[in-house]
Image: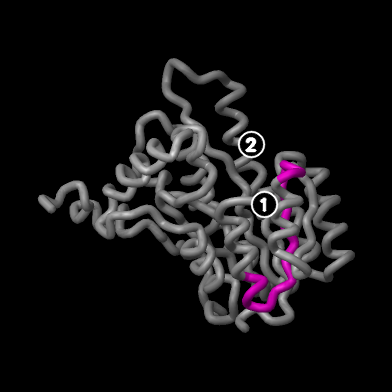
């Protein structure tokens, strides 16, 4: 068990990549704290994950509430060995059709809250802890209509490197997982039927050489490597899990005859 006797905090651990990562971490021996805004999905996640989890309702865009929740969690389970700043939202922001409120909601959730998640965790982090940020291939794709989301993920990419330098004196490692298209509930607003979801998966999967979307637990296993002592001398990097979409785009399935 690679995380035996370790304590991990995962924001947005009530669904998608966060929930998958919580499950993998628990299976590897960790005591896990998950946070989420939705009380129903949070309760369902807590039930599904079992005795190895502590679930806390908190909105990470509220910095004061986040600090309070993290202090409460540390008081119950001890200092953190791992922090996965995973919570985030999707959303298109096309030019000419986007309000300041829409734009700022994405910025505050996917960028500002990530910074304050790490800041709130710092007093409760062991030296030599592992901090993991959740990025996205949108940081480099240049996808039309997704400016705010892409900007936040590009900023997280920079933040990973800055924080790795800043926290190095304490031996705290800061790295990033960078998912490509991954099967999570974030796609539900864009594909509300089974047929629509199948078409979406085929389209997005076809943009990578390996020809499919990622499963959430494949991102979780990348996070596991960064959380564990297997990566004890690894900091300031990102692990991209996208089937080759960004590193070998010319080999995408959509370009093949068969």
Answer few, some or many: residues within 10 Å of disc 2's Cα (few below 14, many 20 plus, some between 14 and 19): some
Q: Is residue 138 left or right of residue 252?
A: right
Is residue 146 rendered to the left or right of residue 173? left
Name the residue furthest top: 96
Quarter occupied by residue 7: bottom right
Q: Where is residue 60 in the image (x, y as percent from the top left)?
A: 72, 44
Residue occupying the far left of the picture: 257
Q: In this view, does 183 lie above or below 190?
A: below
Quadrant where the N terminus sits is: bottom right
- Residue at 49% across, 45% down: 153
Q: Residues within 10 Å of mark 1 (few under 14, many from 20)?
A: many
Which x, y percent locates residue 148?
49, 33
Residue at point 63%, 74% (across, down): 27
Q: In this view, does 75 lie to the left or right of 246?
A: right
Label drawn at residue 108: 2
Quickly name the residue at label 1.
14
Q: In this view, does 128 lie above or below 185?
A: below
């Amino acid at each position: 068990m690679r995380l035996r006797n370790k304590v991990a905090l995962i924001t947005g651990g009530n669904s998608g990549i966060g929930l998958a990562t919580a499950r993998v971490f628990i299976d590897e021996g960790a005591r896990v704290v998950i946070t989420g805004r939705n009380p129903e999905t949070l309760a369902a996640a807590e039930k599904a994950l079992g005795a190895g989890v502590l679930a806390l309702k908190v909105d990470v865009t509220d910095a004061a509430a986040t600090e309070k929740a993290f202090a409460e969690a540390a008081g119950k389970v001890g200092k953190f060995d791992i922090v996965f700043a995973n919570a985030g939202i999707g959303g298109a922001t096309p030019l000419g059709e986007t309000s300041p409120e829409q734009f700022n909601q994405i910025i505050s959730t996917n960028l500002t809250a990530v910074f304050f998640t790490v800041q709130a965790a710092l007093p409760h982090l062991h030296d030599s802890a592992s901090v993991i940020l959740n990025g996205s291939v949108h940081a480099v794709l240049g996808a039309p209509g997704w400016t705010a989301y892409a900007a936040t993920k590009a900023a997280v990419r920079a933040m990973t490197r800055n924080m790795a330098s800043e926290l190095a004196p304490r031996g705290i490692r800061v790295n990033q997982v960078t998912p490509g298209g991954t099967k999570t509930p974030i796609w539900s607003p864009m594909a509300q039927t089974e047929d629509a979801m199948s078409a979406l998966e085929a389209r997005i999967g076809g943009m990578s050489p390996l020809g499919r979307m990622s499963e959430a637990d494949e991102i979780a296993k990348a996070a596991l490597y960064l959380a564990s002592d297997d990566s004890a001398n690894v900091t300031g990097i990102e692990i991209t899990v996208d089937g080759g979409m960004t590193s070998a785009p010319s080999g995408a399935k959509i370009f093949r005859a068969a």
